[in-house]
Image: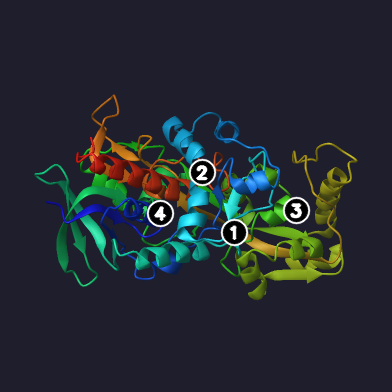
Amino acid sequence: MADVDLLVAGAGGGLAGALRAAQAGCDVVVAEANPHYRRGNNTAMSTAMIPGPGSRWQRAAGIEDSPERFLADVAAKTHGEADPAVAGTLARLGAELVEWLADRVGLPIELADVDYPGHSVHRVHTVPGRHGSALLRGLADAAEADPRIDLLVPARLVGLERSTDGGWRARLRRPDGDEEDLTARGVLLATSGYGAEADLVATHLPEIADAAYHGSEYATGDALRLAGALGGAASTLDAYQGHAGLSAAARTLVTWTTVMAGAVVVDADGRRFGDETVGYSEYAAMLAARPGARGWVVLDARIDAATQGFLDYRDVVAAGALRWADTLEELAARIGVDPAVLGAELADAAAVARGETVVDRVGRRRVAAALEPPFAAVEIVPALFHTQGGLAVDEHARVLDAANPAGRPLGGLFASGGAAVGMSGHGAAGYLAGNGLLPALGLAYRAAEHLSSVLSEKEIPA
């Protein structure tokens, strides 16, 4: 007989799976390698954005949305390259997930009133402060209070094999080298991706390999190695979320909400180099290719005031990373660029804002308002936030067998978040805001539902 019903490796988004399984009557162990996971994993470092098409918050706001509309946005952003099983499952699950987080976990979910690139309506849900640390704190507190969930922290899953009864035998290792074995009916790999493994990044993501990594140091590809040794298939390993808005001084995120509110991005020479509204993920590689791989977000007092609700942005402000100036000439001097060059770029964007032209020189068609003095600028560097490719999974988050062309799953082995294939297609351009957390929480939630339903029939998952 197995020690537990479900072993969850990873206490980020995987906690949603642990909580959902416990709610269904399963006994759960969560093994987390990072002793400081509450502030140091990718869930904690996120902006806590989760798409929930058709949620009650959207209905209350009079927003018409549906899984089908979300899937259309995903298809447009990824050029049809998103994994259909994963994208379809998560689009249909999103509203249920955010409502469950509010009703069963107790998180203060709210609808973000932000126009994110690629989303045709406001559908991204978050928590006050727009920071993943608050989201993770709610999940972790709920897991610690649940009598059916045991958290082993720190403990790393280092070995996995099938047990004689059709379940799984897992080997867990403590930092001091002590090891223990545990048997489980099902295993959920929620150990994140491989962003901290430089060799894998260089192999699969060469365009962003020299950029800063802004993610968990424990995202070293554990799930790929563990499931790969068992014959698990991998998919879209070239997919990732980049971000062009990492503050060079504060090393925290200058939210792209600044851009959507009218800010512009210039390189080290003061020149714009693309339509900033296409997406912050693909902009990371674009910035990395500019002189010195650095640039500036240029904003004004209106945008600064409108962005104070984001904890990351407040941290940037508190670090003294904003350079303020009363005139354009003073701003140009403060950031070391030619005032004529910078002035021409701001004037070009302002013409779109005022309706004087439909599209500016770099292809931008929407500028919320022209920038007005006083101005501010934040120096930025490109960053890799997390990988978006991983183990191939089906609609129940079951890891697929690489040797089986029909896609037969590997028993009760599941993957979620960065450990699994995401819904962003290939590269960085397919990433939509929330495409990291929705698979992290949603696939974990779906895995728990599938395992609990099968166990209720007293069968081993097939």
Give percent across and percent down for residue 420.
37, 44
Comes first in the chain, label 3 or label 1: 3
Which quarter of the picture shows residue 8?
bottom left
- Identity of the amino acid at label 3? Ala
Question: Residue beneath label 1, please?
Answer: 381
Give percent across and percent down for residue 317.
67, 71
Q: Nearer the viewer, residue 363 or 267?
A: 363
Could you classify mark 3 by the number of other residues whose Cα lies within 10 Å: few (under 14), some (14-19), or many (20 or more)? many
Question: Residue beneath label 3, please?
Answer: 261
| Residue found 38% across the figure and 35% down from its top | 395
- Identity of the amino acid at label 1? Val
Left-right relation of 68 to 303: left
Comes first in the chain, label 2 or label 4: 4
Could you classify mark 1 by the number of other residues whose Cα lies within 10 Å: few (under 14), some (14-19), or many (20 or more)? many
Comes first in the chain, label 1 or label 4: 4
423 is higher (above) or lower (below) than 98:
above
Comes first in the chain, label 2 or label 1: 2
- Identity of the amino acid at label 2? Gly
| Residue found 54% across the figure and 43% down from its top | 431
Per the model, the C-alpha gap separating discs 1 and 4 is: 32 Å
Question: Residue beneath label 2, please?
Answer: 94
- Identity of the amino acid at label 4? Ala
Please tell me whether mark 1 or mark 4 is closer to you in this view: 4
Q: Nearer the viewer, residue 459 or 194?
A: 459
Question: Residue beneath label 4, please?
Answer: 16
